Image (spheres, coloured by chain):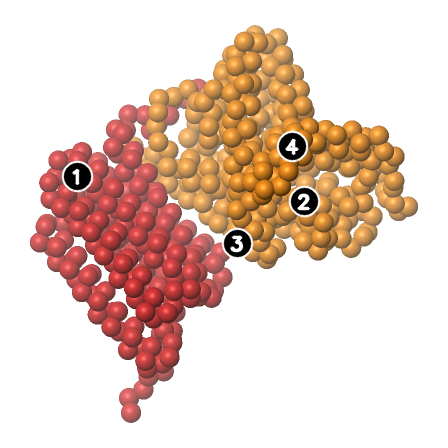
Amino acid sequence: MSPSLSQGIPLASQVINLCAAIMLLIGFAMLAQRRVLTLINLFMLQGFVLFVSTLIVALTTKQNHLLWSAGLTLLLKVIALPYILHRLIRRLSVKWDIETLLNIPTTMLIGIALVIISFNVAQPISQISGTITRATIGIALACVLLAFLMMITRSKAVPQVIAFLAMENGLFFAATSATYGMPMVVELGIALDVLVGMVILGVFFFQIREQFDSLDIRHMERIKEE
Amino acid sequence: MNFYAFFAQLVALAVALVMAPILNGWVNQCRAWLQNRSAPPLLQTYYTLSKLFHKDVLLAHNASSLFRSAPYIIFSCMALASAIVPSLSTNLIYSPAADAIALVGLFALARVFIALAGMDVGTSFGSLGSRREMLIGFLAEPALLMVFFTASLISRSTSLSTIVETLAHREFVIYPSLAFAGVAFSMVSLAENARVPIDNPTTHLELTMVHEAMILEYSGRHLALIEWAACLKLFAYSCIGLALFFPFGIPEAADPVSLAIAGAILMLKLAVGGFLLALVETISAKMRIFRAPEFLGTAFLLAVLAMLVHLLLEAGQ
């Protein structure tokens, strides 16, 4: 009987790894999800997992500024942004909108390829990094790339914005796992940027719908200067 | 030592043969309760089997010898599969002979024969069912293999006994990869056992049948053997799931006392698992057949992710 290689990893690290795996899973679930409402709930769940993992990193490494980041994540990504998004889709009356996606299995296979690429890219970075969460850099990178893929494959405006926000989740996770988070000022700045960006994009949604009677941004490709 | 292994093997086989129809009856009972119907008795599958064994076999005029021999082949494949899976003890006499990959091959052999038998008489429903079965099978098999590969990577062996020993007798470690593999495995086993999201085991509408359509032409003891084999398949899949993902309580020793304890634990786990299966079947609706590739594609994706996550998070440390 051969001994398992994973013995000896501290429990906190194991829980962080579990969180990372769940983040990746949610990334794939968002990629395959057709309904806008479920997409927002998945985004909320991803924010919550991010909060839990940041909290555990903060508590185990005694990095106090990470506690602030975790709190900010909880406030912004689990409560504020989903609330704004829920209100937006209710007022735009796209709550039960179903998007026809092109060939989910193919998108999934591309997603797997992206995961393999990012795992390989992250391997050297993980080796020079000294944090307890270094193994999760690859997963964070994969989350960013999956959100990218989602932005490319979607044609409606709301899912694209959710993909953008999910990408920010991935970046934040990468920062936490590679260097125990960015300086507080940068983090606050990004958080505010995301919030303000969300508000501006919300206004955009209404403008787009008023102009084209639809939130399908493929209409925007045909805009010409008069 | 060797005598005990032989003894444990016999007990495991007997338990599988006896318990499989009861497990099926239990799932049906739970489903009836959840759907607010009055439940059939727990031993209903036995009554059905004995009724079928007493009836005469009616064969189509153009049925070949393959049609007549297929039920025996399928039944023995499934009985052998349930004997290989370490459900009561890891000290089994068969276990060095057949590993996880051989197990998948055994299931594939049974599938080929049931599909051929479905096409043998030449009715349109039979060949329709066979084609659908092969479509589902060819999508489910890679996902099942990937699940086994993940478990094998963790324990560094494809032998089921070694996998169970490694997973059951270690200090507590969270394996994210096993969680992924577990979800993938549940999806595959729903599809392979002709359960609700893919196929409805109680359907009477020929156009939606998959498994039932292939065995429409069977009667008498042939049908009884096939029904029993289906129960054994469900039992084998449940035991694989329990052995890979909830292996606690499966002893390495094979003496009567530990076998009895392991048997009691197995009953408990199967009862809970059967209830969960009934719950899944009740809350989900049957998919269109063309959605099945998507469902099984997701299972394959999860299994591949399990392997990747294992390589990244668990192996490199």
For disc 2, the chain is B
Q: CA distance from mark 2 to mark 3?
A: 23 Å
The answer to whether residue B98 is above or below residue B134 is above
Q: CA distance from mark 4 to mark 2?
A: 13 Å
Residue B191 seen anywhere in this rendered image of the structure: no
Image colour assigned to chain B: orange
Going 12% across and 58% down the picture, which residue do you hit? A189
Badges 2 and 3, same chain: yes
Q: Is residue A45 left or right of residue B120?
A: left
Tell me the quadrant of the picture where the C terminus of chain A can be found: bottom left
Callout 2 secondary element: loop
Going 37% across and 40% down the picture, which residue do you hit? B309
Q: Residues within 10 Å of mark 1 (few under 14, many from 20)?
A: many
Dots 1, 2 in contact, CB < 8 A: no
Q: Which chain is red?
A: A
| Amino acid identity at mark 2 | Thr
